Image (cartoon, helix red, strand yellow):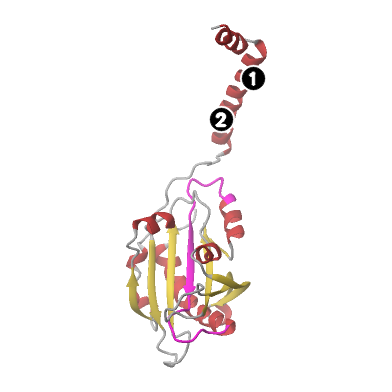
């Protein structure tokens, strides 16, 4: 009882009361400041203009959609952190049957309220038991002639799990990039920086485009994979920009 009384007395001390008042005033001041300055510390969800599932395959010509995969495991889907995604296999009929870039798995994920750290293949694949062999920054040259633009990205190469006796490729490349609030980022750190710049916007979003070249009997070289990614992104990115990603404020 005496100990409880001593605690009650300490709470009534002037120093404690003063600290409590300062904290309360600081919290109120922060709330007023954020309203006055137009800061948005909590973002509201920003949906896609049109679902990724609704991408018109005709707009991807000459590429053909040969498979559309869905994640059936609820735990995997929960760890992904979004239901706005597609996993499509695209075929480029311009390549020969033996071309290792003729088929590619396209994995696109969209986050309408980015309150989490962006997933990156560096962690997802190594967490799944793959060994990372290469990590290189790349710049994709997207578009024809005078309309060409440089888009940052990343090139990775993985080796399959030890003891894996499946027919999967021994080694395969993965390339990816982010779209963050109307601009492109080539890695997670740059994606975070782009997200942090949006404190004056009510909304914020990011989207990851991942290209996995593991659909053919042979793996492409880095040059072949980057060149194939540039051809595909030249077709794919304008469709996403025009019809699916939100118009940035």
**Residue 11, image quadrant:** top right
241 and 66: which is toward the camera? 66
Residue 215 lies left or right of residue 14; in this view the side is left
The reply to whether residue 48 is visible in this rendering is no
Q: Residue furthest front?
A: 163
Q: Residues within 10 Å of mark 1 (few under 14, many from 20)?
A: few
Chain part drawn in magenta: 196-221
Which residue does the image show at 49% across and 56% down from the upper left? 248
Query: Residue 245 location, x and y as percent?
Result: 43, 61
Query: Where residue 19 is drawn, which disc sits there?
Result: 1
Q: Magenta span has 212?
A: yes
At a point 58% along the width and 75% down the height, the residue shown is 140
Mark 2, mark 1: which one is toward the viewer?
1
Q: Which residue has dot 2 on it?
A: 32
Residue 166 lies in what quarter of the image? bottom left
Q: Is 73 on the left or on the right of 131, as rendered? A: left
Q: Residue 132: x and y, percent?
A: 58, 71
Q: Is residue 194 above or below residue 144?
A: above
Q: In what element is the residue under mark 1?
A: helix
**Magenta stretch: dominant secondary structure:** loop
**Which of the two discs, 2 and 1, labels the residue nearer the N terminus?**
1
Identify which residue, 3 or 247, lies in the foreground: 3
The kind of secondary structure element at disc 2 is: helix
Cβ atoms at labels 2 and 1 below 8 Å apart: no
Q: Position of residue 230 (x, y in %)?
A: 53, 78
């Amino acid at each position: 009882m005496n100990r409880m009384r001593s605690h009650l007395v300490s709470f009534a001390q002037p120093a404690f009361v003063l600290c409590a008042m300062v904290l309360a005033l600081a919290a109120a001041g922060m709330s007023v400041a954020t309203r006055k300055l137009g800061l948005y510390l909590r973002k509201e969800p920003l949906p896609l203009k049109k679902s990724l599932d609704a991408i018109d395959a005709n707009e991807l010509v000459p590429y053909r959609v040969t498979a559309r995969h869905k994640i059936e495991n609820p735990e995997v889907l929960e760890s992904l952190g979004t239901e706005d995604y597609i996993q499509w296999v695209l075929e480029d009929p311009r390549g020969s049957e033996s071309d290792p870039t003729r088929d590619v798995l396209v994995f696109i994920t969209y986050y309408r309220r980015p309150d989490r750290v962006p997933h990156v293949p560096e962690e997802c694949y190594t967490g799944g038991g793959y060994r990372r062999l290469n990590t290189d920054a790349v710049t994709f040259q997207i578009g024809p002639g005078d309309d060409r633009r440089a888009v940052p990205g990343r090139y990775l190469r993985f080796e399959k799990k030890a003891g894996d006796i499946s027919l999967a490729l021994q080694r395969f490349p993965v390339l990816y990039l982010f779209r963050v609030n109307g601009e492109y980022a080539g890695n997670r750190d740059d994606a975070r920086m782009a997200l942090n710049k949006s404190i004056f916007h009510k909304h914020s979003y990011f989207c990851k485009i991942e290209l996995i070249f593991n659909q053919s009997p042979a793996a492409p070289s880095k040059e072949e994979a980057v060149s194939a990614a540039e051809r595909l992104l030249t077709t794919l990115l304008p469709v996403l920009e025009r019809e699916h990603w939100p118009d940035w404020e």
